[in-house]
Image (cartoon, rainbow, N blue to C red):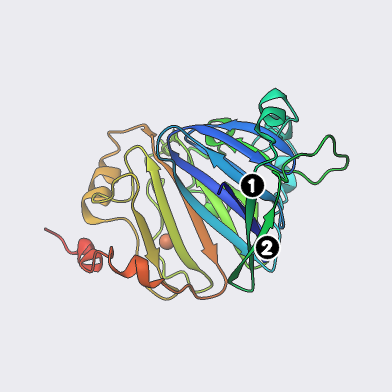
Amino acid sequence: MPALARNADGDELLFIHDSDGELFCDFGHLSYREGDYILLPRGTMWRLETKTRTVTLLIEATNGAYKLPERGLLGPHAVFDPAVLDTPKLDDQFRTQANEREWKVEVKRRGALSTITYPFNPLDAVGWKGNLSALRLNWRDIRPVMSHRYHIPPSVHATFVADRFVICTFVPRPIESDPGALKVPFFHSNDDYDEAIFYHAGEFFSRDNIRPGMMTWHPNGFTHGPHPKAFAAGAKATRTMTDEVAVMIDARDPLDMAEAAEGTEDRSYADSWKAR
Ligand SMILES: [Fe+2]
């Protein structure tokens, strides 16, 4: 039986790591590709239709909602023009996927799943009004802020904010060019946040042992900074651009690792700061 998802616990954010396909939801249809964020408001029924396997990062704002960050002095068109936000359309593809077959909706509430069965496809809206919608944003539309003299803290790369965490996107940008500027991230112990980073594409300029599709997790209080080889490469300043694309989740509350993830953990990660 075809199935839809609905998260009643909070907003959801997908980041498409690989592949492309079609999203169908209460608000209509949109096509997605790698590098897209898709924001789904709490309670949205949705499904992905894809010819090949889609790999995504799913970030849930449990008991909360996503907002765009305040841009302050940078103005409302930083760091992307709000006009690039794409919304689903009630188009022919949406209309033709509606049918009278039996569909089920898997609803998540307080972490538990319940199933609602319909004798038809409930994605059958004929119109909607208002400013609540699913949204699509590709990292290629993000225009990063940087300084040639000053390594700007990562908060400038904030893309979405929720009640107790923030999502930042690192996109290709020039590396600081001033001879006295720090060209790699500060050494720090993130005393206010747990940091999780998902590596999407490119070469990660502060890491020398990370490949696309991997995640790092630096718990609050874990002192870290550039890896030795990356620090040496940064100091030489032979590169003028970084081509990394990564998604960072900075959470006020401590993160826990799920059982399924424990089997994939690289337990030697902390050793990667040792000079080799
Ligand atoms: Fe960090």
Q: Is residue 162 left or right of residue 242?
A: right
Instruction: Give the labeled residue for mark 2.
Output: 10
Asked whether the viewer can see residue 177, the reply is yes
Image quadrant, ligand 1: bottom left
Q: Is residue 162 visible?
A: no
For this orientation, the residue located farthest to the left is 276
Q: Nearer the viewer, residue 147 or 126?
A: 126
Question: How many numbered marks are there?
Answer: 2
Q: Helix, strand or loop at disc 1?
A: strand
User: For mark 1, what is the residue?
Assistant: 46
Q: Secondary structure at mark 2?
A: strand
Dot 1 amino acid type: Trp
Residue 116 found in image quarter: bottom right
Instruction: Give x and y (percent) for residue 20.
Output: 48, 32
In the rendered image, the residue lying farthest to the right is 129
Instruction: Identify whether 151 is placed above or below 263.
Output: above
Q: Earlier in the sequence, mark 2 or mark 1?
A: 2
Q: Can you tell which quarter of the image residue 11 is in?
A: bottom right
Real-space Cα distance between discs 2 and 1? Answer: 14 Å
Q: Position of residue 163 (x, y in %)?
A: 68, 66
Label 2 packing within 10 angstroms: few (<14), some (14-19), many (20+): many
State the residue at coordinates (52%, 54%).
58
Q: For this view, does 101 lie left or right of residue 256?
A: right
Q: For the C terminus, which image quadrant?
A: bottom left
Tell me: residue 67, above or below residue 89.
below
